Image: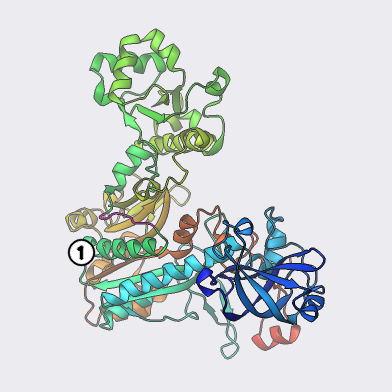
Amino acid sequence: MCGALRPADAGTKTVLMGWVNRRRDLGSIIFIDLRDRTGITQVVFNRELNSSAHDKAEQLRNEYVIAVIGRVKERDPDTVNRNIPTGEVELLADELRILNESKHPPFLPSETVLPNEEMRLKYRYIDLRRDAMQFNIEMRHKVSKAIRDCLSGQGFFEIETPFMTRSTPEGARDYLVPSRVQPGSFYALPQSPQMFKQILMISGFDKYFQIVRCFRDEDFRADRQAEFTQIDLEMSYPQVETVWRVVEGFLTAAFKAAGHQIQSPFPRMSYDQAIRLYGNDKPDMRLPAMVDIRDGLSSGELDELAAKFKMRRDFPLQLIRIPRVGEISGTERRTIGTYGAYQHVEGPSFVQLMTDPKRFAKDFPALADKIMDFAKVGAEDLWLLAGAANRQDNPAVIEQSIQHFCEKCGFLRLDLAQKYAAKHKAFQKSGDAARDFRFLWVSDFPMFEWDTQAKRWNPAHHPFTTLHEEDMAKLEANINSVYDARSPLGEIRALAYDVVLNGTELGSGSIRIHRQDIQRKIFQALGMSEEEARARFGFFLEALEYGTPPHGGIALGLDRIVMILANAESLREVIPFPKTARAVDLMVDAPTPVSEAQMKELGIVIRKP
């Protein structure tokens, strides 16, 4: 291979094949940098030593595919290239074979300035030749293999589940596949193998995993694609900690394959803690948590602040701190809260901000020192206070919950973290895995969430997620209050959990319902009749009647894991053939209309708007 030769190979005869990465013609000598996925070797065509090979080399251009036979020679000390592993040797060509020519490509894999993304995706086969993309795809392979080896070594079976299945509610729109032999009926591409992996537990396989393709017809963003790859697993008889231990094991193996040694067990936090400390259920812990300074103030001091800044005393008084920002201008301070996601969620109408610490220290010198000491604020840190606005004349402000207030503060924290990223440098890779990769388990999610438009409680997870046993009495007592916003249904905790890395949700899982009586109660709490449940989940409910063991599992996004490891900004950098934000494959020009004959055979007519 082109990246394999070393000084120990000097004097040997060898054959190299690959692409012409670069050509330098010095007259009697032509240098060719020959490239394959392993690296580059310099090939020398010398007219004096072999005129026929030299004459043929004059035809070569970038991206020609060639084979070269020659002898390996150590380079002179003053010509050694320390930037590549093969830089101490070169190949003196005896014979050249041009295996294929190339048109001049729209861009070269060796270029340091990339074309626009549309061009890269249209000519993906050229883009994938670049070193960075070769590295990403190789890393993806190594990570996948490490996960497979780890799980297989623990007794998990890799079992494939169908791509063509029935449409079931999963939280996003299905991609539908029409059936020719059953006109008017459709298969759906799976959003996840959820029901199949649970049926595998009912079938007695005990430990299942799959690195599987999933499909969701939803709006795109940097960490979302129409088709994506999921590390899917399910186990019989697990405790929550059992699932966590397995996941920590294969993630440790995956990160080791990518050259990083992470530590387990991962920290753990409840959903309520995450919301109060970070305003987010997938907190990025590379920056400090918010601090509720009420715990460090006397009752009188708290009354004074609440009155001065028109804040509610019964809500957290959050100190938001961004380290090492240094001095910022008064104009910058005045614009805090006027941009980003915080502004988008109308934070200012609900949140009262104190953004000028100098003025605060002047007005409340003793209190300022006390607060900075309590919240461990450094001299170079940017900090501000956020309290819930006390506006009795505005019902929407008064009726907001502590959770909504903390979420708005969390948006502000993230906006500031992004704006001053170049100063605090917390998002830059340091080489210290413990600092660069901040893992976290978030658990005890709410079982139900209030739908403000439909005015009802909906499942916060798929309806086969079980709940804490101690919350069962609360479910039974309020089972018919699905349309009551004040129902204690909102207090019921699911046995659900997420694994989070650097503010990105890597995966979600739960312990499942395995008993028919509990499943019926969950459906009843969701306002679903037995007939409706049978219509939507009939085959699965029937399977539950035939001796279902307790089981649980999780699914993690492989693409997201590799994206973080590659330090990439988009999933498109780690997926070989991705779609654009408009769900288009520019290389093959898909989707496209199909022929009338195909549509007629399927019994489909397109109704144009």
Which residue is at the front of the view, 151 or 499? Answer: 151
Percent position of residue 461, x then y: 37, 59
In the rendered view of the protein, which quadrant contains the C terminus? bottom right
Percent position of residue 151, x then y: 31, 73
State whether residue 445 appears in this view. no
Which residue is at the front of the view, 103 or 420? Answer: 103
Q: What span is in magenta? A: 260-265
**Residue 475 location, quadrant:** bottom left
- Local packing at callout 1 (Cα closer than 10 Å; few below 14, some 14-19, many 20+) is some
Give the vertical position of 357 relative to 15 (above or below): above
Which residue is drawn at the image coordinates 59% and 86% (left, top)? 183
Magenta run includes residue 261: yes
Query: Relative to residue 337, is residue 35 drawn left or right?
Result: right
Percent position of residue 500, x then y: 37, 53
Query: Relative to residue 592, is residue 206 drawn left or right?
Result: left
Which residue is at the front of the view, 471 or 71? Answer: 71
In this figure, which residue is indicated by the disc labeled 1?
239
Give the vertical position of 246 relative to 325 (above or below): below
Magenta run includes residue 138: no
Give the vertical position of 247 relative to 307 (above or below): below
Magenta stretch prevailing secondary structure = loop
Which residue is drawn at the image coordinates 39% and 8% (left, top)? 363
Which residue is drawn at the image coordinates 54% and 59% (left, top)? 571
Q: Amino acid at mark 1?
A: Gln
- Mark 1, secondary structure of its residue: loop
Query: Relative to residue 364, is residue 172 drawn left or right?
Result: right
